[in-house]
Amino acid sequence: MCFLIINNIMITKKIAIVVLFLVTSAVLAESHISVSESWIRTAPPNAPMLGGFVNINNSSDKEIKLIQVNASGFKRIELHRTVDSNGTMKMMRQDYIPIPAHGLTKLEPGSWHIMFIGPDEVPKEGDIVMFSLVFDDGSKQMVHALVRKSMMMNHDHNSMQMNHD
């Protein structure tokens, strides 16, 4: 009986060590990515989509790709990049957004951004929207984005086209 208890304690210690290693590995993987200046553009109450923006810094020695964004309250979420196509700005769906090694990628109007499509309820100016960024190295980063007006001047949404090819 005493042997079984000691044996169970040994197994428990081994399991605890493995769990601690896995948790520590996940935390270390996340430490390569930091985010700042996250926000979502205000939109009318019936808006079919919202633009999300954030600065993503990668302190690792290799490129890391943002591959997915998760949030509740939206039909879907897509990664986009605005490109100039013969003088017309088009939003092109992307499979990933690259974050260069020891570099910064700015998700901002007129460039890389996140499209939150089909909101259950359009958030109001001053609200906070929470979402999770998922990277190809297995790390995740929780983001709390303030809903606010764009600081960008002369941004004409009417000249934008969405392309989901």
Image (cartoon, grey):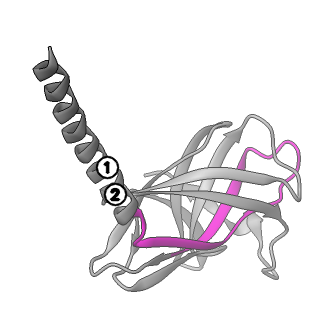
Mark 2 residue crowding within 10 angstroms, few (<14) / some (14–19) / many (20+) = few
Asked if one can make out residue 136 in the rendered structure from this viewpoint, the answer is: no
In this rendering, would 27 be left or right of 41?
A: left
Dominant secondary structure of the residues highlighted in magenta in the image: strand
Secondary structure of the residue carrying tag 1 is: helix
Asked if one can make out residue 56 in the rendered structure from this viewpoint, the answer is: yes
Residue pointed to by mark 2: 24
Q: Which quadrant holds residue 50? A: bottom right
- Indicate the position of residue 12 as horizontal and vertical percent values: 24, 33
Name the residue rendered at 23%, 39% in the picture.
13
Type of the residue with mark 1: Leu
Can residue 48 be found in the magenta stretch? Answer: yes
Name the residue rendered at 77%, 72% in the picture.
156
Q: What mark, if any, has residue 117 been given in the picture? A: none
Q: From what the image shows, is residue 42 above or below residue 7? A: below
Residue pointed to by mark 1: 20
- Indicate the position of residue 78 as horizontal and vertical percent values: 53, 51
Which residue is more in the foreground, 80 or 126?
Answer: 126
Instruction: Give the residue furthest to the left.
Output: 3
In this rendering, would 93 be left or right of 145?
A: left
Where the N terminus falls, by quadrant?
top left
Check whether the beta carbons of the residues at disc 2 and disc 1 lie within 8 A of each other: yes
Mark 1 residue crowding within 10 angstroms, few (<14) / some (14–19) / many (20+) = few
Instruction: Give the residue furthest to the front.
Output: 2
Name the residue rendered at 31%, 49% in the picture.
20
Secondary structure of the residue carrying tag 2 is: helix
In this rendering, would 36 be left or right of 147?
A: left
Which residue is more in the foreground, 12 or 35?
Answer: 12
> Magenta residues, as a range?
30-56
The CA distance from mark 2 to mark 1 is 6 Å
Type of the residue with mark 2: Thr
Instruction: Give the residue furthest to the bottom.
Output: 102
